[in-house]
Amino acid sequence: MEDNRIIKVFLDNDPKPFASFAPPVKIVLDTTKIPDGKHVLKIVAKSSNNIEGIREIPFIVRNGPEIAVVGLKENETVDSHIPITINAYGSETSDFFVIRGSETPKAIPAWVWALLIAFFAFGLFYLVMYWNPDLYKSFF
């Protein structure tokens, strides 16, 4: 019996496959040759009975630097003046570490402040309710 199983791998809507293999196969996808953005890897496999199966896997390529924006969210309605902090950092290996610009500054979340206020308020409440000089008699 002839084995005509084949796997074809397509990228996005390209009608020509960039690779064809006989199963099973392990490949390494080099994303440095793919532009940054959303892509779809389409795998078409043909069985020995010439029955075709298709699987599409969407993925995002980001070979360039990570861009972080603080102060403006996607689809946000804004007016007046808006302070925006923009930072870009990549994963390139280098011999030195630059401290300035390596982290994106973010404000402390409101829930952390609320938790701290609640903690100190409970401590003050406990101190006021249970402060009694008779409980703290000296042993001398």
Image (spheres, helix red, strand yellow):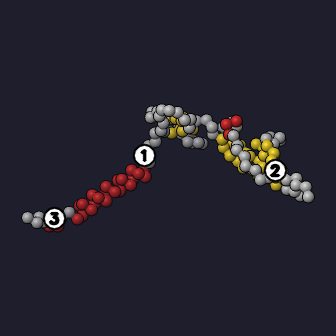
Residue 86 seen: no
Residue at the left extreme of this rendering: 140
What residue lies at 24% left-to-right and 60% top-to-bottom?
127
Q: Which residue is mark 2?
A: 22
Q: What's under tag 2, amino acid-wise?
A: Ala
Query: Where is residue 47 drawn, in percent x and y?
Result: 85, 56
Query: Where is residue 101 drawn, in percent x and y?
Result: 47, 34
Q: What's under tag 3, amino acid-wise?
A: Tyr
Residue at the front extreme of this rendering: 1
Tag 3 near tag 2, CB within 8 Å: no
**In this rendering, the label closer to the viewer, 3 or 2:** 2
Q: Residues within 10 Å of mark 1 (few under 14, many from 20)?
A: few
Quadrant placement of the N terminus? bottom right
Q: Is residue 135 above or below residue 116?
A: below
Whole-number angstrom distance, CA of label 3 to CA of label 2: 84 Å
Q: Nearer the viewer, residue 128 or 103?
A: 103
Q: Which residue is mark 3?
A: 136
What residue lies at 23% left-to-right and 65% top-to-bottom?
130
Q: Which mark is residue 130?
A: none
Whole-number angstrom distance, CA of label 3 to CA of label 1: 39 Å
Whole-number angstrom distance, CA of label 1 to CA of label 2: 54 Å
Query: Where is residue 107 drawn, in percent x and y?
Result: 44, 43
Q: Is residue 45 left or right of residue 104?
A: right
Q: Earlier in the sequence, mark 1 or mark 2?
A: 2
Residue 136 seen: yes
Q: Is residue 55 left or right of residue 3?
A: left
Q: Earlier in the sequence, mark 3 or mark 1?
A: 1
